[in-house]
Image (cartoon, helix red, strand yellow):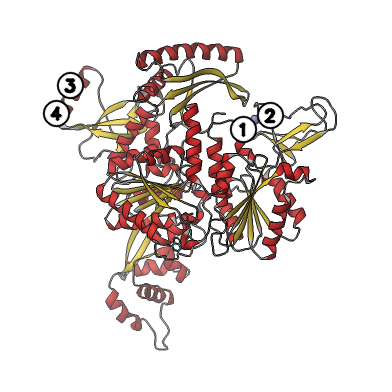
Amino acid sequence: MEAICEVIVDIAHANVDRVYSYLITDGITVEVGSHVLVPFGSGNRQREGFVIRLLPPEETDEARLESMRTVVLKHVLRVIEPYPILTQEQIELAFWMQKNYYCLLVDALRLMIPAQMRGGKVKEKIERTIRLRYPESTAQLLPQLLDKSGKPRSPKQYEVLETLLRCNMEMAVSDVLAFVPNAQSAIKTLIKNGYLLEGDYVTFRRPNMGTAFEDKQVKLNPAQNHAVEAIVQAMEQRSGTLLLHGVTGSGKTEVYMHAIERCLASGRQAIMLVPEIALTPQTVGLFQERFSDGIAVLHSRLSAGERFDEWRRIRLGKARVAVGARSAVFAPMQNVGLIIVDEEHEGSYQSETNPRYGALEVAAFRAKQFGAPLLLGSATPSLLSYYRALSGRYQLLELPERVQNRPLPQVEIIDMRQEFQNGNNGIFSGRLVQLLDECCQKGHQAMLFINRRGYSTFVSCRNCGHVVMCDDCDISMTYHKGENRLRCHFCGSVKPLPSVCPACGKPFIKYFGIGTEQVEEQLHTLFPKAVTLRMDTDTIHTKDSMQQMLTTFSRGEAQFLVGTQMIAKGHDFPNVTLVGVVAADATLMIPDYRSTERTFQLLTQVAGRAGRDETPGRVVIQTYSPAHPAIRFAKDHDYRSFFNYELEQRKKAVFPPFSLFIRILFSGDDEALLSSSVGEYAGRLKAALDERLGKEGEHDILLYSVSPAPIKRKQRAYRHQILIKLLRTARLSDAIQTIYTFAGEHREQLYAIVEVNPQDML
Ligand code: ADP
Ligand code: ZN
């Protein structure tokens, strides 16, 4: 009797986001997780789908009876891959995500497989192979193939046999041809005459990891050892979240690698997330050295084929360590013993596209599924994680010192107001120029950090004060000198630089604010002999260009590296002894309750790039607000004081972690219409919330504001928002559910993007 399976059809539409039943023709093997082709809809169009359940026999009868009364069940047409492409755990995870992030089930499932796998876009690459049929006797045979003068009678055949014998293994035909060119027909003859056997195997394209990294096998220091043992203990207990707080250069990566080794030794697998893989080639290189083919790397810069192959190496159990950015949390593993999130405070772990999931939350769910501990690591943990660690929810592990007693860099703060009063209106302080000069003299290298790309951050008229805005967005445009154009960093549109003010017509257009281009230009003026590299999204276009630039810098072929956040994290350049923060104020100015936290984190991370080898490092922070706590505590490398200060501020204002923000964003072409429909929507949502929260939740809603978004217009569309601040209580998840459900039910009338704890609220 034919069995029945439940299928999610691969169409992202709310109307079809449900389970469909299909009959399985006797003789084909369908498993939970199989990728199948099914007839769908009234026209029976062929669609791909995912099998999420096989009905047990008792339910099969029921379903069959039911189907006789309603619709006739259709048959699965065929199974696309020979193995299930989804694991049972991934299917469970997708259901959890559907509920928690209010996304379509199929959207959650799509995160778990490479996009290229859908629609049959990527094929496995198959190689033909050959091997000797009788290796032993071939050795004796070879001399007989020579003629009297000692020359082979059939040179190509002789060489092929000799090569296979020498290599002593099954070889890809393409490899043999590399040794013995033009031997195709010789191989054919050898096969025909029974000397060789043919085969084939599926190859895996490995992404190019760039330069080889030297793997110094170090001996762990006591603090590192203690951390590793605590992690191993949690692995044995199969639970727990650990927060590894280690200052920059304290050897966290070594701790991760040792913990993973122990995890593998116990027969289990490991997942390690890094903020953005392109920004951490060194970490990946090191992992590659240590675990060689046991590691698979997943990130957005892989080619379609590479990504597919890496995924499949994990799925088929060939790779036991998955390293990657946010999406690697979905790696198709089946026996995870440890999940690590490096630089856990990073915003990039939050997905900004649908489904808007938090990789830390997903990691915590998966860890629980597998009975694995979750290890979070950072030099500057997020306020929330550290708060949880102090309150005992997470186990706190500390690496308070740099390895081998290396000192943390000495940080100087330069008050740029003072510089200006002393007659310096350049972008570098006298002190920074002096240190840059010394750095060059000694043959060391320096990194200069500035949070903005482009030449200047805005363009304005000195006569009337007009600021040049994007035509389509409510945001000022940035001047890019290299291309001599203005660029909108919000929507990417460009326009020419006006020679006269568009408002008053006077020729007093002037640039304000500093960007990476200007820093590079100034360095060149001051140090014409030095080589400067600039790293930002304008100079890094391709998958390898970042790697190339980092390699050039690490070889010492440039003295200065100027860059945005891209240069702030992770990099370990032993010869960098000076780090300059050109303007620390840019991040402080952003109107967000997290700007103090973000500035502290960024300054600490950037400073951490200096003096990582034997020569101690120096850091210069230029600022207009030298007394700001974010800057003072970063100067002293004092995370704990920063935490105490900032937590107190958050407590006073009831900001996260004591509360939670939800932003509901709407957009539309007609401003008046948008405003009135959002107003009405907001009223009804508020009523639904009040009802759900009831009497005891009366004071849970701390803020409920309806207004235009801070950036009122994007790509010509107006933007309005509802901003809700909720107290963290037991009723919190009820409130979130209510909002999601409401948004789902009104999707057709007014589309809304619901963001819980959005990374930015612009
Ligand atoms: P973090 O990630 O904490 O900033 P890293 O893991 O990059 O620090 O380590 C900094 C440097 O110290 C690396 O070059 C690493 O090889 C080295 N290192 C790590 N542990 C030790 C140790 N126990 N002894 C000597 N050197 C170490
Ligand atoms: Zn724009």
Answer yes or no: is residue 568 visible: no
The single residue placed furthest to the bottom in the displayed view is 149
Residue type at the position of mark 4: Glu
Q: Which residue is mark 3?
A: 65
Residue bearing mark 4: 58
Toward the viewer: 234 or 308?
234
Front residue of this view, candidates 356 and 294:
356
* Circle 2: residue type: Cys
Residue that appears at 62% across and 34% down: 589
Of pointers 3 and 4, the one earlier in the residue sequence: 4
- Dot 4 lies on which element? helix
Instruction: Tell me how far mark 1 sits from mark 2, CA to CA.
Output: 9 Å
Camera-near label (1 vs 3) is 1
- State whether label 2 is within 8 Å of ligand 2: yes
Q: Quadrant of the N terminus?
A: top left
Do the numbered discs 1 and 2 sit on residues whose CB atoms are within 8 Å? yes
Element type at marker 3? helix
Q: Say whether mark 1 is within 8 Å of ligand 2.
A: yes
Give the crowd class for mark 2: few <14, some 14-19, many >=20 residues within 10 Å: many
